[in-house]
Amino acid sequence: MVDTQVRPSDVTKFPIISAMLDVEREAFVPQAAQPVAYMDGPVQLADGREMPEARVFAKMLDALDIQASDQVLIIGGGLGYSAAVLARMAESVVMVEEDVQLATDAEAALAQAEVDNAVVLQGALSEGAAKPGPFDVILIEGAVQKIPDAILGQLGEGGRIAAIFMDGANGEVRVGRLVDGHLGWRFAFNAGGPILPGFAEAAEFVL
């Protein structure tokens, strides 16, 4: 997967390559999906939820410029794969998962993998994790149309945030950086995915 999907996508930073080689991806997908854990595409986790393809995930990490001293917040971490990878790259990881079963299974998978610097919080994705913050990095693992202010407020000065923004059937990864209290965004690359609960624009009624 790393040699055929990640490196050809111009992701060559050693910490990313090393972490993705170390983490057994099949340990963080549903049992039925284990035979396709390394395929070139997303892996279905639950109704309306999926693990991003390795290429997209790696390019998001590359754009976020993860540092060993970073405290990371993951929104919608599914079964914990991204938390396991980032735990090898950053100082600490807090993962928020709304789906009770996914959160329970993620906690068990991380414990089985002996990841001791990542914790799983079960709760609404749109609320993030205010208490441990602010964070140096926020990774939203899924697509959005908007990002709630509650989550944006959990990013520390100089921090980076990445998400897939959907506009109809088209999507793009954008990376934001908070500088002097102002969050500026830039385009990173094109990608798509299902919109996370709580991250869709409210429907407008036209008379």
Image (cartoon, rainbow, N blue to C red):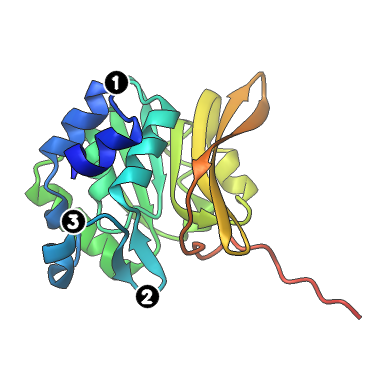
Q: Which residue is mark 3?
A: 28
Q: Of marks 1 and 3, which one's residue comes earlier in the chain?
A: 3
- Crowding around mark 3 (Cα neighbors within 10 Å: few <14, some 14 to 19, many 20+) is many
Q: How many marks?
A: 3
- Which disc number belongs to residue 68? 1
Front tag of 1 and 2:
2
Q: Residue at x 17, y 63 (%)?
A: 36
Where, quadrant-wise, is the N terminus in this rendering?
top left
Quarter holding residue 180 = top right
Residue 146 in view (yes/no)? yes
Q: Position of residue 102 (x, y in %)?
A: 28, 64
**Label 3 SS:** helix
Quadrant containing the C terminus is bottom right
Q: Tags 3 and 2 in contact by the CB under 8 Å rule?
A: no
- Tell me what residue is drawn at x 63 percent, y 64 percent: 168
- Side of 69 relative to 160 (left or right): left
Q: Position of residue 93 (x, y in %)?
A: 31, 37
Q: Earlier in the sequence, mark 1 or mark 2?
A: 2
